[in-house]
Image (spheres, grey):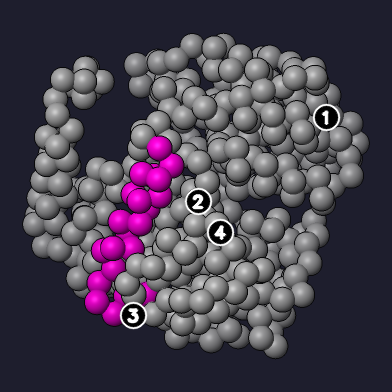
């Protein structure tokens, strides 16, 4: 029905509809963002991790924090999973949440801002004090009718920065210049490699090293230990550190907070450590998938056995064969399975991924639980099983929008007991 309406009703009607709801939500809850500091985090990958890191640092420094991400919702010490199957909730829900954060006397509200949410004006009538750009790679290309439109959607967050607002930008991303050009009272840049003009302050990690426990790096004269795997998580940490520096928190205090983060649910989360390593991760774009595989190749010496799929719903079909190519490049064993098919045929989605694999053998097991079981059976001592696409998501969405409860962490643990006993 929704697709039929989109076909016959002009797009500007939908724009008015979404904008109207955004305004109504703000009016109902009396523009609550004016009474709290708001940090918006956007980009293709890393948003939830950056939010978790910012939240922890601020909290450890004595501030009360509320946040909304694809992983969880949080108001002070109360944390509950995001089970909406929607990263950025509807307009009235966000405004209601901000109002509750204000009533709970939170100092900060941190919001994961998506291009789809921006397209539907869910970011409007929110006063953003800071905007963070993590990175930009291809995603939602079909929905936005091209990469440039996708990039421009992300840029709309920076256009909405309030007077005196600060921008925090990943300088090592190829699209950094676009985001640097937006007006801001202070422009902060972070990275490992490039130094760009047009920013006011630079946060650049030095002497960084990676290992199976995370990474070590230096900022100024201070040594940091990060308990999250991979180079991409170092970028996430630098984004969070930059935000907290803009808020006047010292590097010494930031170090204490960041080292308290032991892991982020569903983000390179190690579920089983011995005798094999089993990891789950949310990676659902080619870029994220490649970074996960690269990280594991660099840190572990055993075989890499991968279980992966791709979401249905007509979204980003272009990426499916690319994910197959990436799987072939890095994995020793490839198992393709179901993810979130929505109304698409799961086997057709899997076959489209398989088209990207030219030479290696592919095993197709539509039932995701069975695919996980097979990967665990194949794994021998020191092998790594990496299961991507779901992470900490609580649902699998099938035809007609039906949600099936899904907990990848628990399923892995249950199947491991069966297989290894």
Residue 202 found in image quarter? bottom right
Q: Is 386 left or right of 64, judged from the image as shown?
A: right
Q: Secondary structure at mark 2?
A: loop
Rendered image: mark on residue 185: 3
Residue 89 found in image quarter? top left
* Residues at marks 3 and 2, CA–CA distance in whole angstroms: 23 Å
Q: Residues within 10 Å of mark 4 (few under 14, many from 20)?
A: some
Name which of mark 3 and mark 2 comes first in the sequence.
Answer: 2
**Residue drawn at the location 70% of the way across and 88% of the way down:** 221
Q: Secondary structure at mark 4?
A: loop
Taking depth in this image into account, of 181 and 74 the one nearest to the observer is 181
Asked whether residue 35 appears in the rendered view, the answer is yes
Rendered image: mark on residue 60: none
Residue 292, above or below 192: above
Taking depth in this image into account, of 26 and 292 the one nearest to the observer is 292
Q: Is 215 left or right of 44, judged from the image as shown?
A: right
Task: Name the magenta segment's main secondary structure.
Answer: helix
Residue 130 found in image quarter? bottom left
Name which of mark 4 and mark 3 comes first in the sequence.
Answer: 4
* Residues at marks 1 and 2, CA–CA distance in whole angstroms: 29 Å
Q: Residues within 10 Å of mark 2 (few under 14, many from 20)?
A: many
**Residue drawn at the location 83% of the way across and 24% of the way down:** 378
Residue 68 pos. (x, y %): 38, 54
User: Magenta segment, which residues?
Assistant: 146-166
Instruction: From the image, state whether disc 1 or disc 3 is nearer to you.
Output: 3
Residue 161 pos. (x, y %): 29, 68
Name which of mark 4 and mark 2 comes first in the sequence.
Answer: 2
Q: Which residue is mark 2?
A: 136
- Label tally: 4
């Amino acid at each position: 029905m929704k697709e039929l309406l989109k076909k016959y009703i002009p797009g500007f009607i939908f724009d008015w509809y979404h904008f109207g709801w955004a305004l109504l939500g703000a009016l109902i809850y009396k523009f609550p963002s004016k009474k709290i500091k708001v940090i918006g985090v956007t980009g293709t990958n890393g948003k939830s991790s950056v939010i978790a890191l910012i939240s922890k640092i601020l909290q450890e420094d004595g501030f009360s924090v509320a946040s909304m991400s694809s992983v969880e919702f949080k108001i002070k010490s109360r944390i509950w999973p995001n089970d909406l199957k929607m990263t950025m909730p509807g307009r009235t829900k966000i405004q209601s949440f901000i109002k509750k954060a204000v009533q709970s006397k939170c100092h900060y509200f941190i919001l994961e801002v998506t291009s789809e949410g921006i397209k539907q004006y869910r970011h409007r009538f929110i006063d953003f004090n800071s905007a963070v750009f993590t990175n930009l790679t291809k995603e939602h290309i079909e929905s936005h009718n091209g990469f440039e439109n996708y990039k421009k959607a992300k840029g709309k967050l920076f256009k909405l920065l309030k007077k005196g607002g600060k921008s925090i930008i990943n300088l090592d991303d190829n699209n950094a210049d676009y985001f640097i050009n937006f007006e801001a009272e202070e422009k902060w840049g972070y990275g490992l490699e490039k130094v760009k003009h047009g920013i006011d302050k630079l946060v650049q990690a030095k002497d960084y090293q990676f290992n199976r426990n995370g990474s070590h790096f230096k900022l100024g004269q201070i040594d940091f230990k990060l308990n999250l795997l991979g180079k991409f998580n170092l970028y996430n940490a630098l984004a969070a550190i930059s935000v907290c520096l803009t808020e006047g928190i010292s590097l010494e205090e930031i170090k204490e907070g960041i080292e308290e983060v032991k892991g982020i649910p569903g983000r390179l989360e190690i579920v089983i450590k011995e005798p094999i390593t089993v990891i789950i991760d949310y990676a659902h774009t080619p870029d994220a998938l490649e970074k996960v595989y690269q990280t594991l190749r660099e840190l572990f010496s055993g075989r890499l056995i991968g279980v992966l799929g791709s979401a249905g719903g007509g979204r980003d079909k272009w990426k499916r064969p690319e994910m197959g190519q990436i799987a072939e490049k890095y994995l020793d064993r490839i198992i393709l399975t179901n993810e979130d098919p929505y109304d698409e045929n799961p086997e057709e989605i899997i076959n489209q991924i398989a088209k990207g694999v030219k030479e290696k053998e592919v095993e197709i097991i539509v039932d995701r639980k069975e695919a996980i079981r097979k990967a665990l059976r194949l794994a021998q001592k020191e092998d790594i099983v990496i299961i991507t696409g779901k992470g900490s998501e609580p649902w699998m969405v099938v035809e007609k929008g039906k949600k099936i409860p899904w907990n990848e962490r628990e399923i892995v643990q249950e199947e491991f007991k069966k297989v290894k006993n």
